[in-house]
Image: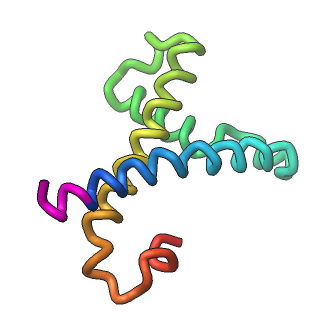
Amino acid sequence: MSDFVTRSLAGAAAGLAATGPMTLFMEAGRPFLHPAHQEPLPPRHITERAAETVDAHDDMNEPLKKAATGVAHFAYGAGAGAVYGALSPFSPMSPIWGGM
């Protein structure tokens, strides 16, 4: 397996794993938001906008919206990690600091 593929897969796994704690942190902080900002968190908002774009929003019940939000959120984390893993050798920064 090439270094590029290995780095991409390692990055995807790391991104997927990091999405869990990040999601818990987002949800834990939600009650502390100002009432004016008590709207859906970005993953839900993005999923709803995507469903509206493909004209599927009205066909989705709440459990399906929650599932789609979770799948999309973790897929985004894995995808971002894969891109980061693939491109990290080209960054002048340390991989630890470059990912922050």
Which residue is rendered at x = 59% and y = 15% of the image? 62
Which residue is rendered at x = 38% and y = 18% of the image? 56
Extreme-left residue of the structure: 2
Residue 99 left/right relative to 91: right
Q: Position of residue 80 (x, y in %)?
A: 38, 55
Residue 8 position by quadrant = bottom left
**Front residue of this view, candidates 50 and 89:** 89
Extreme-front residue of the structure: 1
Q: Is residue 82 above or below residue 48?
A: below
Which residue is rendered at x = 79% and y = 44% of the image? 28
Indicate the colouring scheme. rainbow
Q: Is residue 12 above or below residue 70?
A: below
Q: Position of residue 21 (x, y in %)?
A: 64, 48
**Start-end of magenta stretch:** 1-6
Tag count: 0
Q: Is residue 72 magenta?
A: no
Q: Position of residue 18 (x, y in %)?
A: 54, 51
Residue 57 position by quadrant = top left
Which residue is rendered at x = 48% and y = 40% of the image? 73
Q: Is residue 78 above or below residue 64?
A: below
Residue 2 left/right relative to 88: left
Assign the magenta stretch its main secondary structure: helix
Quarter holding the N terminus is bottom left
Residue 74 left/right relative to 87: right
Q: Position of residue 94 (x, y in %)?
A: 43, 83
